[in-house]
Image (cartoon, coloured by chain):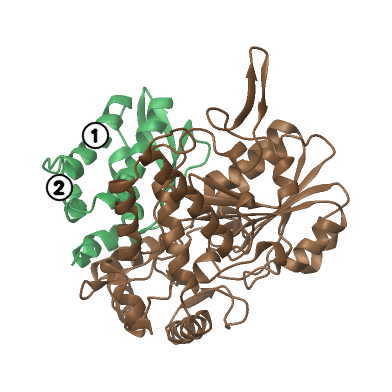
Chain colours: A green, B brown
Amino acid sequence: MSDELYGAAIKELAAREPATLDHPDASATQDNPLCGDRVGIDIRMEGGRVVAFGHRVKGCVLCRAASTLAAEQAVGLDAEGAAELADQVAGMLKQGADPAFPALAAFLPVRPHKSRHNCVLLPFRALAKAVGGA
Amino acid sequence: MIKSIREAFPALGRPGFHYLDSAAMAQIPGMVSETIAHLNRTARSNVRRGLHEMARRADEAYDGARDSVGRFLSAPPEEVVFTGGCTLALNMAAWGLGCALGPGDEVVVSRLEHHSACLPWMALAKERGFALRWLGVTPEGRLDLDGLGAVVTPRCKVVVATHASNVTGAVSDLPRLAEAAHAVGAVLLVDGAQMVPHGPVDPRALGADLYAFAGHKAYGPTGIGVLWGRAEILAGMAPLVVGGGMVGAVEDDGFTLADPPHRFEAGTPPVAQAVGLAAALDWMGGLDWQAVHQQEAALTWHLLDGLRGMDGVRIVGPLGLEARVPVVSFTVAGCHPHDLAHLLAERGVAVRGGAHCARPLMSALGLEEGTLRASLAPYSDRADVDALLSALSEAVAVLR
């Protein structure tokens, strides 16, 4: 039974209201065609690093929770760091790597559910796309 | 009767497994699997090419499959085109009709359509310069036919409509659509993917000019679909795919087309799949459909009634049993359809969550997150519906 997917930590992350950002330097959108989830990322950059972050999420609990976590991790990242963060999340879900930082461990129960990996990855990929394109 | 039907489907014998995703893919009777295996054992050969014994058997089997599909559709076999699936059939129809259109022409597509029925026309409209007009839906998820006359104008050349919606389950009034289309000289193209699994269809009697459906939703194998067309319509259509088997004469500077249906079956056709589909349709032809429809209606009502009694549930589609197939979509306030579908799967209940490849409809109904969809078949029983309702209550409790 995968009810643990929807544990308190995930639900708490998902319940947080997404931050918004006016006049971003860069934006990116990622879609999951399987379920129709969509994540939009807005960022403001200084010296090649993210200094402010906003996000728009239309998605399931896992996607909303992951988007909140991506927002928490975004500030201070450069393009390489954002891409590395997305790779770390993918590595934890798909290759069994340890969580790269403690908060990511909340998504460990998603690991056996391959069809849900993209729900978690979507915001991190959107972040990497936004920072990489800024 | 459900018990005897159910016993024909080996996949349904697993205890605690409740398959309510037949609108995506129906299960296959063991007899159909055996028919396909038998063909591969005894008559695996290309068709309309060879002179040896295996080729003769394959020809007979393939031609016989066309006869069976024709019987199911009350149509002559010459009007039955085998395709790789319903999506390909709908693309073939769109290309065959649409490549002759241009600026000043209009094509009307209903908002109930599956992407397979509307995307080919969206792409062609952009390429050919004709206009695409949308036929709206009512809040109940039925085609809004009140505005039909205003949408289907003398410029209209093709009307595209689903026979039964894969989201709302609503059955379209094809005779009325045909009347409006034919009054302006337009062709009615129908996506029958969700209707055919619920009994034999006579597209000509309903007023359709072209009618497509999929094998895998009609208890047959994957990789097979059918495009039926009135002979005079097919004769005027260009093929989407050219190659071996669909030509008349070939010269250095061009070629002539074979007559339908072969014109539309370039390359090696899906022989075993066609034979499997024919076996499935023959099996369907042996069912007492009046009794099946009564059972499906009773189960649909039980499902609708159960959903109506649950907090926060919005049923997306007709609330009654009139003019609907047993496909029931719904949302639950505060719960994303994909989360619910996942939790239901963990409880042995197979349903579909998402947009169901019907984004234009989702947008029209304000359902950006999609819906949960439970779809029934003649093998569905009350235990399936009860399991869904019970699991849904548990899943909602997990998410809230």
* Residue B239, image quadrant: top right
Distance from disc 2 to disc 1, alpha carbons, whole Å, reads 16 Å
The quadrant the N terminus of chain B occupies is bottom left
Find residue B273 and report its horizontal and vertical position in percent. Answer: 41, 50
A48 w.r.t. B196: above or below: above
Q: Secondary structure at mark 2?
A: helix
Residue at numbered disc 1:
A87
Mark 2 residue crowding within 10 angstroms, few (<14) / some (14–19) / many (20+) = few
Mark 1 residue crowding within 10 angstroms, few (<14) / some (14–19) / many (20+) = some
Q: Is residue B275 visible?
A: yes
Q: Is residue A32 visible?
A: no
Find residue B277 and report its horizontal and vertical position in percent. Answer: 44, 57
* Residue A51, image quadrant: top left
Left or right of residue A69, residue B93 in this image: right
Is there a contact, CB below 8 Å, between mark 2 and mark 1?
no
Left or right of residue B131, residue A104 in this image: left
Q: Chain of mark 1?
A: A
Tell me what residue is drawn at x 44 percent, y 84 percent.
B299
Find residue B340 and report its horizontal and vertical position in percent. Answer: 35, 67
A47 w.r.t. B5: above or below: above
